[in-house]
Image: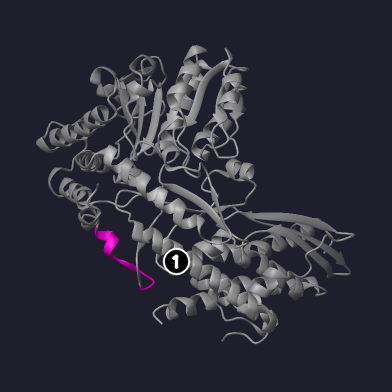
Amino acid sequence: MLDVAAIRREFPILSRQVHGRPLVYLDNAATTQKPRVVIAALREFYETTNANIHRGLHLLAEESTAKYECTREHVARFLNVPQHDPAQIIFTRNATEAINLVAHAWARKFLTRGDEILLTVMEHHSNLVPWFLLAKATGVVLKFVDIDTQGQLRMDQLRRLVTKKTKLVSVTQASNVLGTINPMPEIVREAHAQGALVLVDGAQSVPHFPVDVQVLDCDFLAFSAHKMLGPTGVGVLYARKAILETMDPFLGGGEMISKVTLEGATWNELPWKYEAGTPNIGDVVAFDAALTYLEDIGLDAVRAHEERLVTYGLETLSRLSGITLYGPPTATQRTGVISFNVGDLHPHDLGTALDRSGVAVRAGHHCAQPLMRRLGVPATARASFYLYNTEAEIDALAEAIEEAVQFFSQTARRGGRAKASVR
Amino acid sequence: MSTQPREYELDELYRDLILDHYRQPRNHAPLAHPTCASEGENPLCGDQVAVQIELADGTLADIGFSGRGCSISQASTSMMTECVKGKPLAEVRELIDQFKAMMLQDAEPTPQLGDLESLQGVRKFPVRVKCATLAWNVLERLLQANAQGGTA
């Protein structure tokens, strides 16, 4: 069991108030809050070490470089990459940029007209739009796996759609809307059996349960630091070394070159070949502290806590009248994400009312418009949990939903005397 | 009683008039002979509004809309149709300017805006301002396109 009270004390923002109420932060699938150690690491870097990396012969440059590369080694350990080789970890701005890197540096080089990429209807726009752009430019064909009524991937369909034409299967490990955890080992087996590579969108999985890329056996993995207690502006791409060695550069500029003449350039070694220009040094350095913090608590413990929360959340919310819950019915099949609608209340109206109760949720299409269309709704409200959330906060959410429903039904009753305005 | 300040603020946003228009939208029907039509979308919350207008002798003779979305977007559209219907185009353009000034520049509502004054509270909810102005932007685009077409 996590000592949640002790954990909460490490997150200064959790003690603030919003609209005169204690903050109940349930928007962790969008971004997570930061513990003191991460904030302190950022501050310490700028107060003691700041310098540009991989160039300059002075002490600060050496220390900055060492710290930056130290985070890369930490990420490599965190994911248990093959041969423990940190050259397989590329820093980007976010998971979106990591996926775009694969689309540009790998897919544009190796895929041709008629080749197929298999996606799913539950993907975030970040794992759709890069492929739309690629398809338009190259004639690559995109195919999509549907979901069943419980919000789980139709594996029967996936098996039919993976063929010798399929060159890449790009799938989220956990849905940012439904919370559904996809059966990655099986998906990877099916893809590899047909010679296709697999990109795992780990934005909603790597922060929430142990992810070992050797167990997954995936070829690419993308995720963002800010969704796992780290700073914004840091994304990670893991790719197998053999693949990285064959890919073209993504962005051109400083740092990624070996030698430049007016006739051309040769590329730097891995991983720097894919990191053009001055990277986000300070935030990468502070991300190290977030990884240590998570490891000290343990990803298994985080997962167990979230499973308890989502079990309690599903039970509690399902008791509210008029509520529709989306996604798999049991906690073991999902992460700490619950999307819902209440009666004919528009999620945006609901979100505004919850905010006034101090409860921060996301309301909208969650950058997954195709999934919204598939579910037949314009939008949903979404509560998403992390290690510092409590069952009491889920009670506060339920209470705030009831208050909102009551508020709107009261105003509906008053609607008859609409001209007699409230003010 | 601790909930009073919050509910008071919600009351300010969701005035009865707004909810009345949301539940019983006016001019919520397609036109028989539309001169032109256009639609808009607020990607943040998935609000959709399609507006049809019929122009005759320099006036906005008729207007109809369809769409779905949050109460603010749908109520604002409904109120807009009531406000501009039958008015000379020059006056409609003025109303659009006055409404947008109220929503975006904190201008006081003019008497001509009538019931639309009730949307003033939306200003306190910055993310919702786009919901309120959605249909107005669609109408503005329609009138601009029509003027460029040489009918004005």
Residue type at mark 1 is Glu
Q: Quadrant of the N terminus of chain B?
A: bottom left
The image quadrant of residue A355 is bottom left
Q: Residue at x 45, y 21 (%)?
A: A188
The front one of A290 and B91 is: A290
Label 1 resides on the chain identified as A
Measured as percent of width and height from the top left, residue A349 is found at 55, 64
Determine crowd level at label 1: few under 14, some 14-19, many 20+ residues with C-alpha closer than 10 A.
Answer: some
Residue A19 lies within the magenta run:
yes
| A193 relative to A81, above or below | above
Question: Looking at the image, which residue sits at the far left?
Answer: A59
| A225 relative to A131, above or below | below
Q: What colour-coding does the image apply? A: one colour
The image quadrant of residue A11 is bottom left
Q: Which residue range is magenta in the image?
A: A12-20
The front one of A208 and B90 is: A208
Q: Residue at x 40, y 64 (%)?
A: A396
The front one of A54 and A396 is: A396
* Residue located beneath label 1 in the image: A399
Measured as percent of width and height from the top left, residue B17 is found at 65, 78
Is residue B98 something that shows in the picture?
no
Measured as percent of width and height from the top left, residue A129 is found at 55, 36
Q: How many marks?
A: 1
| A300 relative to B82, above or below | above
